[in-house]
């Protein structure tokens, strides 16, 4: 790995904190010349400095390494504005209430942008008393299946993990549900709006 953090990111974050190169260097016990080299791309911080550098710049190590300075604009934590992240290695599913840098199994995960339900991933919803009975007509084979179904309102997420050779179905309390999601392990995230 020849680049793991860019000088432009270091400079931008240092400038945003109104910190000089000398002040950052003092915090990290390095020379201001070293900081200058990092920022101009003539060198990189030693790996042992990544955690202290991230702390000095008030950013997570993951954000520093990815070059992303995430600011969550969903301060009210409206669940409808949340994002789904799915690890392609272990299948771990993470739901956030806004922008985030998420890492699992050593990789940074992109948020999934849902597509509308299509013929191959048709999300069917029936009203059964006070619940939605949700099904997806989709293969449920070991290498191609729906991994989860979720129903989201502005204040809660109902989530059902599915497994191969089972049925792509779930029941959700109907109260205030606005969006229903289905995730296919090959084709991504699909959504319908209620």
Image: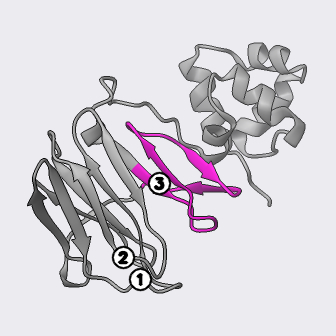
Q: Which residues are magenta?
A: 84-111
State which mark lies toward you, 3 or 2.
Answer: 2
CB atoms at circles 1 and 3 under 8 Å apart?
Answer: no
Image mark for residue 85: 3
Is 44 placed left or right of 141 in the picture?
right
State which mark lies toward you, 1 or 3.
Answer: 1
Measured Cα–Cα span from mark 1 to mark 3: 21 Å
Q: Residue shown at 22%/35% (left/top)?
A: 154
Callout count: 3
Residue 156 in percent (x, y) is at 30, 37
Q: Describe the colour scheme in one phrase.
A: one colour
Label located before the other in sequence (1 or 3): 3
Is 93 placed left or right of 30 in the picture?
left
Q: Can you say whether 165 is above or below 191 in the image?
A: below
Measured Cα–Cα span from mark 2 to mark 1: 7 Å
78 and 41: which is toward the camera? 78
Image mark for residue 167: 2
Residue 14 in percent (x, y) is at 63, 23
Asked whether 86 falls inside the magenta stretch, the response is: yes
Q: Can you say whether 27 is above or below 138 in the image?
A: above
**Helix, strand or loop at disc 3?**
strand
Is 128 placed left or right of 58 in the picture?
left
Residue 167 in percent (x, y) is at 36, 76
Label located before the other in sequence (3 or 2): 3
């Amino acid at each position: 790995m020849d680049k793991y953090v860019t000088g432009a990111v270091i400079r931008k974050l240092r400038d945003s904190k109104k910190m000089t190169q000398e002040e950052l260097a003092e915090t990290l016990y390095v020379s201001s010349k070293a900081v200058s080299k990092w920022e101009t791309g003539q060198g990189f911080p030693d790996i042992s400095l990544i955690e202290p550098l991230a702390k000095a710049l008030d950013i997570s190590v993951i954000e520093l390494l990815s070059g992303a300075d995430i600011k969550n604009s969903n301060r009210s934590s409206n669940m409808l504005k949340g994002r789904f992240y799915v690890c392609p290695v272990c299948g771990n599913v993470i739901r956030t209430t806004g922008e985030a840098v998420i890492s699992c199994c050593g990789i940074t995960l992109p948020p999934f942008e849902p597509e509308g339900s299509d013929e191959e991933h048709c999300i069917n919803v029936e009203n059964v008393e006070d619940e939605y009975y949700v099904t997806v007509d989709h293969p449920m084979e070991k290498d191609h299946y729906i991994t989860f179904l979720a129903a989201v309102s502005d204040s809660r997420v109902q989530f059902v993990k599915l497994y191969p050779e089972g049925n792509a179905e779930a029941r959700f309390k109907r109260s205030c549900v606005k969006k229903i999601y289905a995730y296919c392990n090959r084709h991504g995230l699909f959504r319908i709006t209620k």
